[in-house]
């Protein structure tokens, strides 16, 4: 049996807090697994895993979505858009995931209607769901760089903005959203305002998930055609060639919430890692995937490595090596 567990956010990524975090964490069960493993890297990110479950095989997720919705002939170019809240932090603007807004269908319809009226000669928005919208554009979108929000949550957007033309459109969108009555109403009700959109596209790594018979997640923020909710009993997801995505650490790590990170890491160690150790003899291969911004750390255990527990590798050591890079 082969089993893969994805733990985005496992490696605390803020080097300024690394010494404090290292002193606070204890992961004896996870360390047992790491000591028996081999360490390597593979060239994909968290969003590669999640969005590969959407696609039917093109190199543009936006164009693939347009095709699925029957809009591919309407515009020469397509992007994806996510509503978001940009939070000022000194001289930085930090981005958050669209799920935090909890927009309902009526609000989405109202926002898209206002945007489409304003930008009628340039672009048009089509809802995919409340958190992800398709954008058809009349203008060229060459020489841009794109990042899904999922890969840059809690980061300064200045480092990830698309090209100049699209950034100007984003600025105009922000002014329009600021003046929406809907946002004024949300503010009065104590709800998070939608003060920006994030425009992006993604080249899909075709076939990346084909080897998995099942993909499970504990997160309500991850939606995909091939992704199912994790069973209440984790060991019921221990099916051959399954991928289990557990994102309890990801958002605390992205937002620098050390308290939640340390707490959730302890829970994962005592519950998830303990269960993996108890069932270790069942697995011909066990993989722990740690997706990062640029690549994924791969911790691999196979039958020959199960008894090689003398290696001097721990989670703290992996964090130290990451921050040294």
Image (cartoon, rainbow, N blue to C red):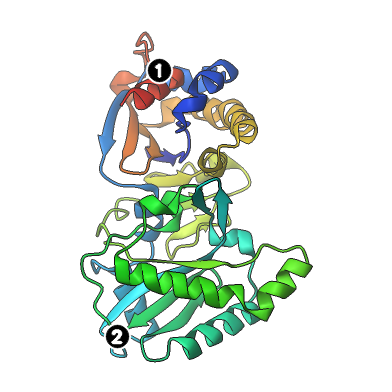
Q: Farthest residue in the front direction?
A: 91
Secondary element type, mark 2:
loop
Q: Is residue 242 visible?
A: yes
| Residue ID at (21%, 65%) | 143
The answer to whether residue 314 is above or below residue 99 is: above
Residue, far left: 143
Report the front residue among 91 and 165. Answer: 91
Residue 74 is drawn in which quadrant? bottom left
Residue at point 65%, 31% (across, down):
259
Q: Horizontally, is 126 left or right of 103 in the view?
A: left
Quadrant for the N terminus in the image: top left
Give the x, y percent position of residue 93: 50, 53
Identify the residue at horizontal 59%, vertical 19% (top origin). Answer: 24
- Nearest-to-viewer mark from 1 and 2: 2
The dot on residue 317 is 1
Residue position for label 2: 138
Asked if residue 138 is positioned above or below residue 314 in the image, the reply reads below
**Residue 188 in the image, given as x and y percentages of width and height:** 78, 69
Which quarter of the figure has residue 13?
A: top left
Q: Indicate left or right for 112 with 41 as reference.
A: right
């Amino acid at each position: 049996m082969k089993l893969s567990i994805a733990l985005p956010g496992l490696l605390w990524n803020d080097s300024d807090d690394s010494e404090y975090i290292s002193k606070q964490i204890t992961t004896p069960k996870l360390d047992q697994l790491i000591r028996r493993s081999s360490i390597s890297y593979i060239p994909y990110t968290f969003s590669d895993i999640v969005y590969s479950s959407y696609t039917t095989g093109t190199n543009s997720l936006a164009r693939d979505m347009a095709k699925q919705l029957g809009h591919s002939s309407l515009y020469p170019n397509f992007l994806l858009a996510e509503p978001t809240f940009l939070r000022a932090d000194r001289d930085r603007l930090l981005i958050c995931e669209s799920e935090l807004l909890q927009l309902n269908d009526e609000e989405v319809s109202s926002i898209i209607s206002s945007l489409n009226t304003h930008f009628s000669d340039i672009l048009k928005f089509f809802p995919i769901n409340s958190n992800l919208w398709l954008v058809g554009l009349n203008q060229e979108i060459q020489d841009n760089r794109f990042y899904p929000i999922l890969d840059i949550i809690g980061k300064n957007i200045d480092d990830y903005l698309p090209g100049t033309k699209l950034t100007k459109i984003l600025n105009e969108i922000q002014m329009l959203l600021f003046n929406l009555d809907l946002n004024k109403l949300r503010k009065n009700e104590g709800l998070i305002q939608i003060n920006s959109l994030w425009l992006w596209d993604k080249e899909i790594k075709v076939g990346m998930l084909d080897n998995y018979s099942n993909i499970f997640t504990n997160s309500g923020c991850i939606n995909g055609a091939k992704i199912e909710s994790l069973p209440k009993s984790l060991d019921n997801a221990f099916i051959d060639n399954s991928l289990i995505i557990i994102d309890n650490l990801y958002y605390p790590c992205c937002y620098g919430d050390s308290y939640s990170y340390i707490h959730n890491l302890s829970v994962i160690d005592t519950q998830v890692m303990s269960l993996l150790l108890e069932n270790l003899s069942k697995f011909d291969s066990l993989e722990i995937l740690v997706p990062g911004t640029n690549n994924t750390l791969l911790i691999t255990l196979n039958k020959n490595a199960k008894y090689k527990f003398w290696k001097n590798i721990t989670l703290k050591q992996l964090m130290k090596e990451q921050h040294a890079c």
